[in-house]
Amino acid sequence: MNRFTGRTVLVTGAGSGIGRAIALAFAAEGARVVAAGRTAAPLEETVALIEAAGGTAAAVPADVTDSGRLAGLVRETAERFGGLDIAVNNAGILRGTVPAADIAEEDWDAVLRTNVTGVWLAMKHEIAHMRENGGGVIVNVSSNLGAHTRIPNAAAYVTSKAAVAALTRAAALDHIREGVRINAVSPGATAAPMSLRPGETEADRVERIKGENPLGRLAEAEEVAAAVLYLASPEAGAVVGTDLVVDSGSSA
């Protein structure tokens, strides 16, 4: 399919895992993709994969906790490719995997600053462009942890992702009449680096998921990407403020 031919898509956290899969999926359907993240090298790897498949992409380093840099990211995207039609706010971190009362304050602050404030800041600048240029679509990446279920020793992450789901719903209502359609995707355990728990090997994770997950396997990053592309597509034109769960039944 070529649902996104002629569209420009910005993906944060595009250097690996789910973010890379999202960038590749949009490019495969004809989009021009800006891959953003803190570190240039993995972004350039994502762009190389897109270009090797015949797609068009650019790597633009940006820290989502830096409002000025995010404003520049949106501006550079529009200047390079003629606009910004779709934004996927995927960047996130996991720290403080200890009981809630034992989380270091700096870890709490870092997780909330990146995972919640970073999404809000990104939307702030994305919406400012979209509302002045005919509208657009935003998909935020939340998580089934926090938005739909919980695990021990992840209070900062769980709190941040619950906040992303709530922020998505609130912003969706605020901006839909301006032509900006906003939704979220909540992945569960996915074949991506962040789903590994501290000290866990790949083999350990596979066995753990078999026991806890109704489907009996990890979701693939490409399956999460497919959900993001659906929400960004014309087929989802009446979908506003939803949180699409892709967690193999874990929160059913």
Image (cartoon, rainbow, N blue to C red):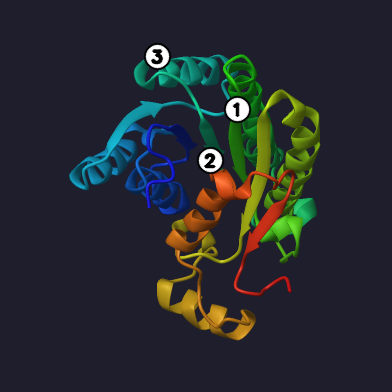
Residue at (54% x, 50% y) in the render: 228
Residue lying at 50% horizontally and 69% vertically, measured from the top left: 219
Residue 88 appears in the rendering: yes
SS label for mark 3: helix
| Label 1–label 2 contact, CB within 8 A | yes
Q: Residues within 10 Å of mark 1 (few under 14, many from 20)?
A: many
Kind of residue sitting beneath label 3? Glu
Kind of residue at disc 1: Ala
Residue 134 in the image: x percent, y percent? Answer: 59, 21
Q: Mark on residue 91?
A: 2
Secondary structure, mark 2, is loop
Q: Secondary structure at mark 1?
A: helix
Query: Toward the viewer: 250 or 55?
Result: 55
Say whether residue 165 is left or right of residue 22.
right
Amino acid type of the residue tagged 2 in the rendering: Ala
Earlier sequence position, callout 1 versus callout 2? 2
Circles 3 and 2: CB distance less than 8 Å?
no
Q: Is residue 165 above or below residue 5?
A: below
Distance from disc 1 to disc 2, alpha carbons, whole Å, reads 10 Å
Marks counted in the figure total 3
Image side of residue 97 versus residue 15, left or right: right
Separation of residues labelled 3 and 1 (CA atoms): 17 Å
